[in-house]
């Protein structure tokens, strides 16, 4: 059994590269699963693609079926039409306990730009559900991802990792937005996109007192749904030009694969809006707004995901003790998970060995009871119990040794020995 | 306790130490140090109040009418009142980093200007009081506008360059700084204007007295130029529709720096013949006062 991950995230690759390797929609992910199945049919897969990370988890019953780092890089290269040389060094690989630990760190938001954020848990959950729907995952990845959710919950409840500002939106609005605007109740907030990110951003902005919310989305029913949830107004995407000059805060979270607002479009918007300050939060990956828009005039304050990194580093320092505690939990959970996985691998052998020995004892007992028919029921029961105890005691040392072996790694050699010694067949 | 033993050095040192403690926040943010800084500034404020009251008692004139030395100290005192008020409102605000240097500059400058009362005060006592009040409040507004503009530019730089906020440098939002700056300019320029008008009215009143005011002097021309400059800024602020906060902050800083430098230069060069007699610094006057055993302990 093996678990593997290849990934690039905000620590290893810049936003430009992440944008090129991202799977911006469910359709992309489903196509990726089809492609992966065709290339590596004996593996299970889960793809996590967010604005901060692109991660591909694979798992195999037989470690020999594990694709190499280069194989998976080639898949990324072919799928996204990006030369492998441009990203190979930024695409890291982990296997076995290191891969499990990595997922637990990601789910616990230790690896997030904003330490303690909760959004990543939902993103992992969504990715895992999509993998289940498309039958890309299997028993190993099921166990892994379900455990990751449990670890995440444990880390959040037993440490102070989630205290204070915990989401990208809250850091952006708390550290930048509130330094621009004194109050939000007289501001017009324009949301472009209607996904989970938009919803979370709105939750935070609502908490700051925002009253007027405009939601524009290409999928109008989704815009209506989001607007209704936050007492806002939904408008068709075609009305964007009307609302952009009126907005004081623009939050863009669309899944577009190229910028939806360039410099020229924004120049026209500023002509209409005048020099008033406008706070723009581009939370899309790929970016929705061209970065040069920031240089148009003094009143434009544009931030994308990477811009939040400095604040995140600061939060990370403040929460150093919480991180140490979280790491200890993750380390213990990783060991426990690996032990369970290895132990699970021994399960069928143990079951067969036990059944085999008990079957032999049952046959011998039947012979005995035929030879000694005068034994009453109570006596027969006592003999059966004695024989069963003897079998269990004889089985105990090899099984205990097998269990010990499984604590440190897959007990492949021991399993083979047992199979040969006791003639156990697959 | 001898209140007459309170000297300029007492409160200058207090404010200076308060500023140093504010600066140490950049090394390590500490609530204890922050409160200590506030306590030192408050101690300085008490000492300065005692000093001004003592000066006023001995000269038998309100501090505003005492001398250039006194009104510079009154301006510093009012700035400290603003600083203490802001700190009580929000302890974490780094306002001291901006206000305390200006206060130290004003106190330092007061050491080198005339501390002799204006002999013309008695001619139109109440008009002089009104004139000095408008002038000092106007200058206070200018000082605070200067401080707000500095904060605005720093905050704007941080936000434009997408830098994380420093825990030791907590500033108000751009929106609030911009609004405060606008109000400070819009209120200080009319105050300065009223100061000019009352000054002209007093010169008219004194025209027939033994101590007439000659308006054809460099100092009057300089004051008038500063006032014209500030009035232009005021007018531009009111009518401009394309004024960005950053532009306003830059213009305010330039105008305020020009005003403060002009006023201090006039006083240092003893060119101010309207508001006082020939320059006599507190050091010089101390010798005179020690001799007369009248006000021996002020410096």
Image (cartoon, rainbow, N blue to C red):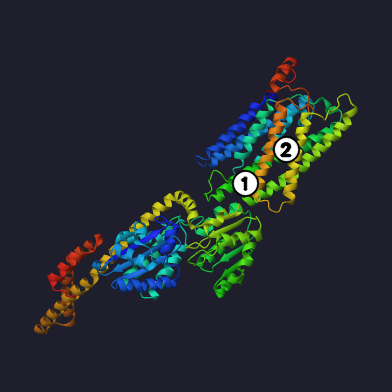
* Residue at disc 2, secondary structure: helix
Using residue A122 as the reference point, say whether residue A194 is left or right of it.
Answer: right
Q: Is residue A160 left or right of residue B90?
A: left
Spatial CA distance of label 1 from label 2 is 20 Å
Q: Are marks 1 and 2 in contact (CB under 8 Å)?
A: no
Residue named by callout 2:
B139
Q: Secondary structure at mark 1?
A: helix
Residue at the spot of label 1:
B152
Mark 2 belongs to chain: B
Residue B75 can be seen, yes or no: yes
| Quadrant showing the N terminus of chain B | top right
The residue sitting at 61% across, 45% down in the picture is: B153
Which chain is mark 1 on?
Answer: B
Picture coordinates of residue A226 (x, y %)? 56, 70
Badge 1 and badge 2 in a common chain: yes
Q: Residue at x 36, y 72 (%)?
A: A33
């Amino acid at each position: 059994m093996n678990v593997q991950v290849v990934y690039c995230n905000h620590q290893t690759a810049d936003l430009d590269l992440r944008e090129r390797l991202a799977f911006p929609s469910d359709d992309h992910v489903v196509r990726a699963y089809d492609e992966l199945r065709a290339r590596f049919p004996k593996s299970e897969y889960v793809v996590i693609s967010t604005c901060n990370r692109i991660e591909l988890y694979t798992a195999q019953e037989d470690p020999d079926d594990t694709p190499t780092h280069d194989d998976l890089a080639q898949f990324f290269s072919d799928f996204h039409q990006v030369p492998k040389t441009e990203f190979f060094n930024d695409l890291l690989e982990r296997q076995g306990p290191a891969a499990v630990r990595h997922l637990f760190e990601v789910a616990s938001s230790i690896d997030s730009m904003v330490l303690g954020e909760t959004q990543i848990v939902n993103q992992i959950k969504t990715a895992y559900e999509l993998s289940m729907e498309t039958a890309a995952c299997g028993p190993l990845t099921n166990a892994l991802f379900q455990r990751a959710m449990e670890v995440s919950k444990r880390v959040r409840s037993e440490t102070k990792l989630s205290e204070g500002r915990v989401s990208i939106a809250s850091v952006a609005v708390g550290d930048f937005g509130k330094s621009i605007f004194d109050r939000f109740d007289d501001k017009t907030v324009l949301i472009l996109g209607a996904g989970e990110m938009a919803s979370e951003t709105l939750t935070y902005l609502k908490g700051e007192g925002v009253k007027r919310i405009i939601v524009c989305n290409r999928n109008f029913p989704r815009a209506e749904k989001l607007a209704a949830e936050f007492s806002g107004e939904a408008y068709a995407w075609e009305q964007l030009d009307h609302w952009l000059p009126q907005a004081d805060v623009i939050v863009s979270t669309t899944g577009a694969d190229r910028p939806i607002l360039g410099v020229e479009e924004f120049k026209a918007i500023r002509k209409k809006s005048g020099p008033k300050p406008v706070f723009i939060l581009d939370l899309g990956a790929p970016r929705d707004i061209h970065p040069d828009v920031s240089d148009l005039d003094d009143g434009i304050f544009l931030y994308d995901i990477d811009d939040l990194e400095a604040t995140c580093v600061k939060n990370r320092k403040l929460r150093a003790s919480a991180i140490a505690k979280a790491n200890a939990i993750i380390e213990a959970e990783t060991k426990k998970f690996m032990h369970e996985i290895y132990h699970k691998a021994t399960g069928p052998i143990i079951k067969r060995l036990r059944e085999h020995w008990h079957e032999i004892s049952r046959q011998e007992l039947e012979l005995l009871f035929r030879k000694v028919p005068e034994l009453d029921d109570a006596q027969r029961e006592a003999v059966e119990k004695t024989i069963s105890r003897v079998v269990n005691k004889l089985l105990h040392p090899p099984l205990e040794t097998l269990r010990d072996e499984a604590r440190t790694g897959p007990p492949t050699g021991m399993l083979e020995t047992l199979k040969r010694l006791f003639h156990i067949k697959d | 306790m001898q209140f007459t033993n309170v000297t300029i050095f007492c409160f200058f040192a207090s404010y200076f130490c308060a500023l140093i403690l504010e600066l140490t926040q950049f090394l390590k943010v500490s609530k204890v140090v922050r409160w200590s800084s506030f306590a030192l500034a408050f101690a300085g404020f008490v000492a300065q109040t005692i000093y001004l009251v003592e000066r006023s008692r001995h000269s038998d004139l309100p501090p505003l009418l005492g001398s250039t030395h006194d009104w510079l100290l009154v301006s510093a005192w009012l700035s400290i009142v603003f600083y203490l008020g802001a700190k009580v409102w929000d302890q974490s605000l780094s306002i001291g980093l901006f206000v305390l240097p200006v206060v130290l500059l004003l106190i330092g400058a007061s050491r080198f200007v005339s501390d002799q009362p204006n002999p013309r005060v008695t001619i139109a006592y109440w008009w002089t009081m009104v004139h000095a009040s408008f002038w000092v409040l106007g200058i206070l507004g200018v000082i605070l506008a200067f401080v707000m503009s500095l904060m605005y530019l720093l905050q704007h730089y941080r936000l434009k360059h997408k830098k994380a906020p420093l825990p030791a440098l907590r500033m108000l939002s751009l929106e609030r700084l911009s609004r405060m700056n606008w109000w400070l300019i819009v209120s200080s320029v009319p105050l300065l204007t009223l100061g000019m008008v009352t000054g002209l009215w007093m010169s008219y009143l004194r025209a027939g007295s033994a101590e007439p005011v000659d308006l054809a002097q460099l100092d009057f021309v300089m004051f008038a130029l500063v006032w014209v400059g500030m009035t232009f800024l005021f007018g531009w602020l009111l009518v401009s529709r394309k004024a960005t906060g950053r532009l306003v902050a830059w213009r305010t800083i330039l105008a305020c720096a020009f005003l403060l430098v002009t006023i201090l230069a006039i006083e240092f060069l003893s060119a101010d013949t309207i508001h006082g007699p020939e320059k006599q610094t507190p050091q010089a006057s101390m010798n005179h006062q020690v001799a007369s055993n009248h006000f021996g302990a002020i410096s």
